[in-house]
Image: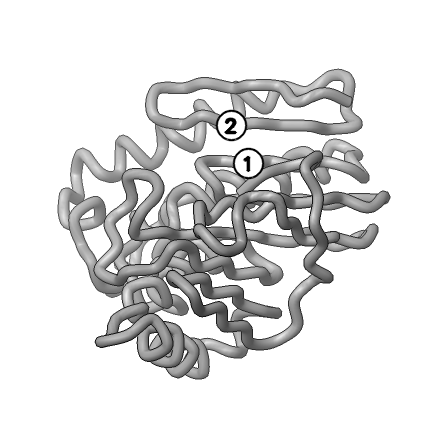
């Protein structure tokens, strides 16, 4: 099983799956179309930095999930878009019989794995480097692994983290939480920044398994994280 690339406008999916035949590209095209059509009529949905009240009307599944996840994570809906696409893509593959699929969308991952997986942690931190990884044991249920950073990528972050990685059941929610927690990586020292972010985590513990925060010379963790190992060869990289 090798990584496949699925490119659709601003959505770039890396995929490995045990399904030899699938039409994931068409599925992603369809949910992206639903989202774009909704945004055309509801501009605030794409601009809001805080949760919006869900309208009392029938919504496309991707739009409904983004409303729901952003409310849980206390962020605007678009902060959840990459993780939502990853999660819905994985659900599509599982519903078609997959027991091993990894969907990565801009550092936001949704996976189900019937064998061990190494997920590299790419924070560009001067002390940790980029040769550490989560060792994900085989599991039957989907897992979300999402990362936000103030220093890597194009996402909006009001904090100063090297990386904030959130692991939980839903990559849609974890995507929003990574943004929300990363926004609180602020303070006079890196120790203060990590401490403030960990305090923020306490408000959302029901929605994640564990969080890893990397900022300069300090690292903070909360909850239950997979084992962290040194490795130069990863199945996937955050």
Label 2, label 1: how far apart the Cα atoms are: 6 Å
Closer to us: 223 or 150: 150
Can you give x and y, in whole percent of width and height, for residue 168 in the image? 59, 62
Left or right of 105 on screen, residue 11: left
Left or right of 139 on screen, residue 14: left
> Which residue appears at 49% of the width and 55% of the height?
127
Colour mapping = one colour
Residue identified by numbered label 1: 104
Closer to us: 173 or 38: 173
Quarter of the image for residue 12 reads top left
Are dots 2 and 1 in contact, CB under 8 Å?
yes
Quarter of the image for residue 228 reads bottom right
> Which residue appears at 18% of the width and 34% of the height?
40
185, above or below 88, in the image: below
The answer to whether residue 196 is visible is yes
51, above or below 60, in the image: below
Closer to us: 115 or 110: 115
Regarding mark 1 in the picture, which secondary structure is present there? Answer: strand
Can you give x and y, in whole percent of width and height, for residue 186 in the image? 26, 71
Q: Earlier in the sequence, mark 2 or mark 1?
A: 2
Regarding mark 2 in the picture, which secondary structure is present there? Answer: strand
Task: Bin the neighbour count of mark 2 within 10 Å (Cα to Cα): few under 14, some 14-19, many 20 and up.
Answer: many
Can you give x and y, in whole percent of width and height, for residue 196 in the image? 34, 79
Residue identified by numbered label 2: 13
Left or right of 194 on screen, residue 57: left
Q: Give the position of the N terminus as an image quadrant.
A: top right
> Which residue appears at 70% of the width and 34% of the height?
233
């Amino acid at each position: 099983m090798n990584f496949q690339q699925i490119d659709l406008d601003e959505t770039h999916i890396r995929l490995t799956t045990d399904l030899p035949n699938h039409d994931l590209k068409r599925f992603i095209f369809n949910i992206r179309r639903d989202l774009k059509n909704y945004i055309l009529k509801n501009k605030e949905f794409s601009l809001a930095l805080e949760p919006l009240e869900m309208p009392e009307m029938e919504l496309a599944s991707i739009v409904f999930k983004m409303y729901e996840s952003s409310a849980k994570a206390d962020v605007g809906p678009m902060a959840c878009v990459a993780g939502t696409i990853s999660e819905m893509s994985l659900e599509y593959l599982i519903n078609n019989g997959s027991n091993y699929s990894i969907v990565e969308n801009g550092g936001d991952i949704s996976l189900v794995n019937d064998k061990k997986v190494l997920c590299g942690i790419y924070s560009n931190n001067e002390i940790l480097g980029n040769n550490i990884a989560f060792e994900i044991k085989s599991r039957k249920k989907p897992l979300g692994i999402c990362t936000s950073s103030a220093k890597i990528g194009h996402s909006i972050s009001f904090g100063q983290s090297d990386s904030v990685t959130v692991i939980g059941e839903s990559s849609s929610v974890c995507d929003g939480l990574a943004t929300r927690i990363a926004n609180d990586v602020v303070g006079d020292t890196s120790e203060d920044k990590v401490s403030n972010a960990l305090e923020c985590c306490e408000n959302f513990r029901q929605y994640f398994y564990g969080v890893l925060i990397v900022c300069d010379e300090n690292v903070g963790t909360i909850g239950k994280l997979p084992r962290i190992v040194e490795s130069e060869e990863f199945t996937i990289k955050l």
